[in-house]
Amino acid sequence: LFFLYSFLQVNVMTALSPELFALLGGGTKLALLSSFAFFANVIFLLPAGVIVDRFSIRRVMLGALSIAVIGTLLFAFSPSFFVAGVGRFLTGIMIAFGLIASLKLASIYLPAEKMAFASSLIITIGMLGGIIGQAPMSWLVSGLGWRSALTVVAALGVLIGVILAMAIRKEQQKTLQESHHPLKGLYGAFKNPKNWLAGFFICLLNLPVAVFGALFGITYLMQVYGLVSMAAASIVSCLFLGMIVGSPLFGWVSDFIRGRRLLMLIGSVLCLFFVGIFLLIPHWSVGALHVLFFLIGFTSAAQVLGYPVVTENNPPHMVGSSLSLAAIIVMGGGYGLALPFFGWLIDLGSKSYSLSVAYQRAFFVILIGIAISSVLAFFLRDKKST
């Protein structure tokens, strides 16, 4: 629920954008307002890992959730652009804690052999928060207006806070590690090669979701296949549906066989195959594209196994810092750097080739990334159970 709320906050601006576009007088201010949450996320990702390792996870989660509720209410009742920006910045702080704190909590409550399934469920439930931020949120905005809709979002945060306060027992807190300096834990996280291998595995296997799902998928299908926006969006949504189905399945099987590496290899190789045939074989039917995007999302879901690799290969006082490092690699590399890079490749290719060829040549970089993820999975040996 904590991660669901943070992912809802990530996606809430989509539903608000039509009204805010008119209110703010254009897209520039709207984009800037939206970016405040991203700035806070980037700034606080690393401190979030240190904080969840250092303090009571119960207090950290309730504190972060409170900050998000305050930020949402500031945004909802903002008299000026500046106050709205402060509100979005505060919600961005909570977003930085979303996945890291949830995985840390799971590592406290659950044995290592259950972490893959737990991680996959956390991510799957978080994606449901993204879905809530789309059509249901748009329905709220159209019925109540954007300010009242945000008030409902704040109330949801309060409700989740009450549930967290009741569910997380104080006696199970592995709190304040007095013998471990926070910078020492951070240094240890950066020094562990498995954290880097797992982080880049997640980042590279997530490229189809980042490139097709977050930015270029709908545009590509409209411009190259000539589809209308609703049909293209329906196909791209199958990518996320595949992730929702595949994530818990990969996690459950991984825990059942007590191994991560084999499924990481299988998932990355199969994802490479499906992305490859999508790019190499032109003129797929609309029905086949739905199936193909589902399979790409399903096999890409093997990326969730990178998170239990991190939690299993670090001592408790370094888990949060190590997850922060992985999150920075995924967000910074997979979204912060990769998406502008793909845009630049498409623009560059379109100067010499048709738009279809320009897209295809740029998307071949995805194949290279997935192939590298397979190699990284090969070197990520499973931790021997004791």
Image: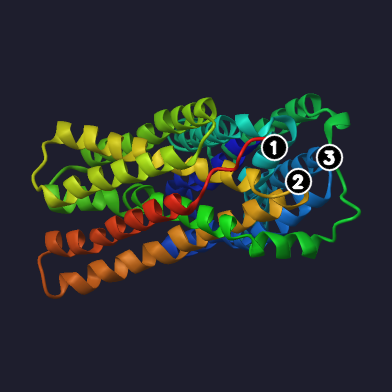
Tag 1 residue: 107
**Amino acid type assigned to the residue bearing label 1 in the image:** Ser
The local crowd at label 1, few if under 14, some if 14 to 19, many if 20 or more residues have their Cα within 10 Å, is many
Q: Are marks 1 and 2 in contact (CB under 8 Å)?
A: yes
Picture residue at 85% right of the left edge, 57% below the top: 180
Q: Is residue 48 left or right of residue 148?
A: right
The secondary structure type at the circle numbered 3 is loop
Of residue 312 and residue 24, the one placed in the foreground of this image is 312
The Cα–Cα distance between marks 2 and 3, rounded to whole angstroms, is: 9 Å
Residue on which the image places disc 3: 174
In the figure, residue 76 lies in which quadrant? top right
Which numbered disc, 1 or 2, marks the residue that appears first in the sequence?
A: 1
Q: Is residue 332 above or below residue 249?
A: below
Q: Nearer the viewer, residue 110 or 217?
A: 110
Mark 3 surroundings within 10 Å by alpha-carbon count, few (fewer than 14), some (14 through 19), many (20 or more): some
Check disc 2 and report the residue beneath it: 316
In the rendered image, which quarter is residue 232 located in? Answer: top left
Image label count: 3
Q: For this view, does 309 lie left or right of residue 17?
A: right
